[in-house]
Image (cartoon, grey):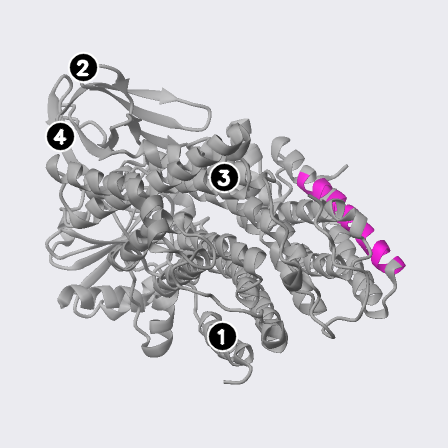
Amino acid sequence: MNNAVLGQSAVILGFLAAVSGAAALAYGLQQRRPAVVRAGRTYVWLLLGAALVACLAMERALITHDFSLKYVAENGSRTTPLLYTIASLWGALAGSILLWGLVLSGYLTAVTVRFRRHADDPIVGWALLVGLVVAAFFFGLMLGPANPFRTVSGAVVGDGPGPNPLLQNHPLMAYHPPMLYLGYVGFTVPFAFAIAALATGRLGEGWLVETRRWTLFAWGFLSVGILLGAWWSYEVLGWGGFWAWDPVENASFLPWLTATAYLHSVMVQERRGMLRVWNLSLLISTFSLTILGTFLTRSGVLDSVHSFTESSIGPLLLVFFGVVVAVGVGLIGWRGDELRAPGSVDSPVSREGAFLLNNLLFAAFAFVVLLGTVFPLVVEAVNGDRISVGRPYFDRMTGPIGLALLFMMAVAPALPWRKASGELLRTRLQVPAWVGALTLVGCVVAGVHGLTPLLAFGLGAFAAAAAVRQLVLATRRQGVRGLLGRANGGMVVHLGVVVIAVAFAASTSYSHRSEVRLRPGQSALVRGHRVTFLRVHEEKHGNRTSLVASIRVDGGRVFAPALSRFPFASQSIGTPSVRTGLREDVYLTLLSAPRASDGSIVLGVLVRPLVVWLWIGGGVMAIGTLMAAVPGRRRLPTSPASAPVPDAAPPRVPVAAPAP
Amino acid sequence: MKRPALWIAATVLLVAAALTAVLATRSPAVTKIADSPLIGRIAPDVSGKALDGATVRLADLRGSFVVLNFFATWCIPCQREHPELVRFSQQHAADGSARVLQVIFDDTAAAARDFGKTNQVDWPVVEDPDGQVALDFGVRGPPESFLIGPDGLVLFKIVGQVDAAGLNRLLNEVAR
């Protein structure tokens, strides 16, 4: 069957399923007819089926080189290896929206299955309604400006240009975007439950325990996605960096910050019933920021290496962002005051006090990043100047917040709920504080210089020791089982974050870059590393021709930085070659082709310490997230805070009890 | 304060509405400055056959600012930026303070000639059949432009479309 027809029909079917499901749920909820609500849920399966068929049709078109489809003609090529052909699904705008639709329908189906026993509960009904409205929006985009199944007019070409060369240079490209989407789109579920809670007025902690796990899931994927992006940037782009405060990076980092804040503050709600409205606000902000980020990266208003091509979906995304914010904030304004929790923080020196401060820090972090990202646009709107906010702003503003967060990471786990005594703090913090102080002194003695990296190392050691102390206590009490569950999984995540923070501080503060011109056989000494240029040769791959230099590092292995050219586009891009080590990386880039006169090349050599620990830290974070998602021992939320707010909701079925 | 959530929500809504309004009224970013190892260095040599058969060299244009533009006729942003290049070139035609030099990027001379028949092109267009010029300048995809100073130094690299106003702004920035 024709791919275009099949895909287009599936998109239409998906859109209709989302709209009909949402309409049925709205009607059923409004008329209080559980049978209609149950019927509305079945549309989710139709939506999933449609999204699957649409994606399969696109993959089939890509793999069979069906150049009658505009998307394939623009992004496919007969010479592109299979992996990158499959990954082209998310390599350009329309396809990425298609993947978005698939991931969203997957999440909605998971919600339907997870809560199948609570099908009649209005809170689940409302959440699905919100999810289906979001799905209707994205499928609607595919019917309009982001239609992936548009066909070419006129003659069908015999071959296409293939994906952007930068996207077919490294296998990580195949995994980074799906991970990001699993994170981004996953935040729709907690958002939907937050809106459902506001709409029904039932802010009991019951739904919250569930929402936390969905948020954790999405957050874990987003963390991995962001780190894979950093890794890809390091391995592919050839400038030796992994984070540039580029608008697109910021767009993925912003929801990560607010979601991290939520994962912490939700514990205060579970334990003390406080911060309810704040938590709802964080969930709504997180989702709004994903939509804002999608707008920023796909509308072309910002200057970014990642921007998708200019397209007309910008205005629609902006309208959607406006609607999401208006509905979310409007509901909070309407319901917020009656939902506010009884009770207050007893003492600032307590676990809840620490979480509050942690949340303020994360909110400040997010504000600083958001401001830096949109500031150029605001300035331009005010006086017409085009300015750019660069690295120095972000480094200067976020550095102190990051250090403060490291400090909180060390202290907070030691604090008890309600109130801490000085005696207790002394016993709990003594060892970690000594570890931190000794690390600091050790670094100074070893000749480490620079205030920020020194503070990062000292506070990092303090925080790591605090986390290890918690883990040791937990395993002593419960054995390996003690490592599971939120609190201790969280400590493992903390360890990963500390590793990343230390690696980040070291690799940005102590890297050394130089450029050397070398004739064949000639060597140069860069920061204690001897690089020898052996020869250069040409290699032909299916999709590119590369000029490859052979460089021996420290008399050992030979590395091969290259300049690649992709035949169809005749674009040349550098492929760095990295000697990865636990202590430092030697990052080689070929900067110029051999000179005709003496065959000499210009080689870029960057020596960067501890980079590999960024990725190791990311792995530790992922493992910690998994451990935190496994249910550990959980105390039941205190009953008064879990009870429905009187009169706010019509009396109906009891609150969905979380399945353990 | 009574009903703090309502007041806070109203404030947040106002800020969000203002932000949305700002975002809604922005035009797509053009004349995007990008980093390049060439900046601050003497531009690599550009010399080749122009479409009219004459030999053109970048070095011969010393004394004026040069916008070195890599383009292809199949590239949509290149077609869109073309009138802006014409405008820029005309603004500086009288005093010769700035010129445009185009390099064909992955396209045929015939296609570029056809393009010139239907569009005003009042500057030299150089062929780059083996892509050596593009390789020297590290061009990834058209359109990319380099602003080169009267002394032959590379001042800016611009990725994506340019506009006349943006190019003039860059010239003013250098003058300052």
Q: Is residue A42 magenta?
A: yes
Quadrant for the C terminus of chain A, please: top right
Q: Are marks 1 and 2 on the same chain?
A: no
Disc 4 element: loop
Question: Neighbour class for label 3 at 10 Å: few (<14), some, many (≥20)?
Answer: many
Q: Nearer the viewer, residue B20 or A569?
A: B20
Chain at tag 1: B
Mark 4 residue type: Arg
The residue where tag 2 is placed is A555
The residue where tag 3 is placed is A489
Mark 2 residue type: Gly
Disc 1 element: helix
Q: Nearer the viewer, residue A335 or A464?
A: A464
The correct choice, above or below, for A583 with respect to A322 in the image is above
Closer to viewer: mark 1 or mark 2 = 1
Q: Which mark is residue A527?
A: 4
Q: Which mark is residue B12?
A: 1
Quadrant for the N terminus of chain A, please: top right
Q: Are marks 3 and 4 on the same chain?
A: yes
Chain at tag 2: A
Closer to viewer: mark 4 or mark 2 = 4
Mark 3 residue type: Gly
Which residues, given as a range, are shown in magenta? A35-55
Question: Neighbour class for label 1 at 10 Å: few (<14), some, many (≥20)?
Answer: some
